[in-house]
Amino acid sequence: MNVLDFKNKKTQREKISVVTCYDYTSARILNSTRIDAILVGDSLAMTMYGERSTLPATIEVMAQHTTAVVRGAPDKFIIGDLPFLSYRSSLSENMNAVAALMRTGAHAVKLEGVDGNEEFIRHLVGSGVPVMGHLGLTPQSVNQLGGFRVQGRDRNQAELITSAAQKLEAAGCFSVVLECVPSALGRTISESLSIPTIGIGAGPDTDGQVLVWQDLLGMNKDFKPKFVRQYLNAGEQIESALNQFADDVIAKKFPEARESYE
Ligand code: KIV
């Protein structure tokens, strides 16, 4: 998969699968799957560090995790997420943030929103950096949006998001994430763009889907938003394996002779 394949897949009506990943071991697993691309999302602030939002993610942390994922998944197309405010300063500071991510070996960057970003996106694309946009529920604006909630329910908001998506395409984005918007809006936007939309909580008609690693694998028992499908009960299975180990240690069933040196 490379940046051109995103558009080719849309033209050929082939859906695109993307999963988030934040560490080397998980990236190694992803590398041998049929998943098309990996997003090292700033959601890592929540999934890996237990924060309540993505805002605490820094460019240093993003670059460190992206490096680990690049090492683990050398065959995958990897998108590094630009964290909160890292692309809202001077051009040179913004470029330093992008350079930090791209020098890890990532193939593209993602950023949220359109207002104030169009010139920067043009500059990046002109500098050889593929850019993925992100609209709808943009978690870096959670305080402005008044919480993690579905966006684009009313007509005015829906039109604003649609026109923002068209601006992102015009600025040169190769793809746009649509997060938590009604399915009808996901479909309308996808039909109005020639670049692919990657949905999360945006219904079945976006050109691809992205899920967060921990959600897809069912690692958090108490977190199951409507748009998530859990393909595994990893949380429960890991818990049970750990309890089995603890019991075996107490019962002196581990290690056995075959697991020990003579
Ligand atoms: O940070 C992230 O993981 C994301 C996805 C939810 C699209 O932006």
Image (spheres, rainbow, N blue to C red):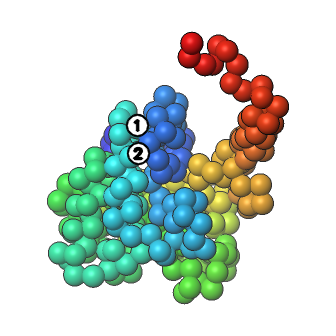
In the image, residue 90 lies at what x, y percent?
22, 81
Image position of 106 with respect to 172: above or below: above
Q: Are marks 2 and 1 in contact (CB under 8 Å)?
A: yes
For badge 2, the amino acid type reads Val
In the figure, 170 relative to 238: above or below? below
Residue at the spot of label 2: 69
Query: Residue 18: x percent and y percent?
Result: 51, 46
Q: Is residue 185 visible?
A: no
- Cβ(mark 1) to ligand 1 < 8 Å? no
- Circle 1 Cα neighbour tier, 10 Å, few/some/many (<14 / 14–19 / ≥20): many
Kindly identify the residue that appears in the image at 63 percent across and 60 percent down: 202
Label ID, residue 98? none
The front one of 177 and 44 is 44
Q: Which residue is mark 1?
A: 73
**Residue type, numbered disc 1:** Ala
Query: Is 100 placed left or right of 176 in the picture?
Result: left
Please state the horizontal and vertical placement of residue 159, each as a whole percent of the image: 55, 77
Q: Is mark 2 within 8 Å of ligand 1?
A: no
Q: Quadrant of residue 80?
A: bottom left
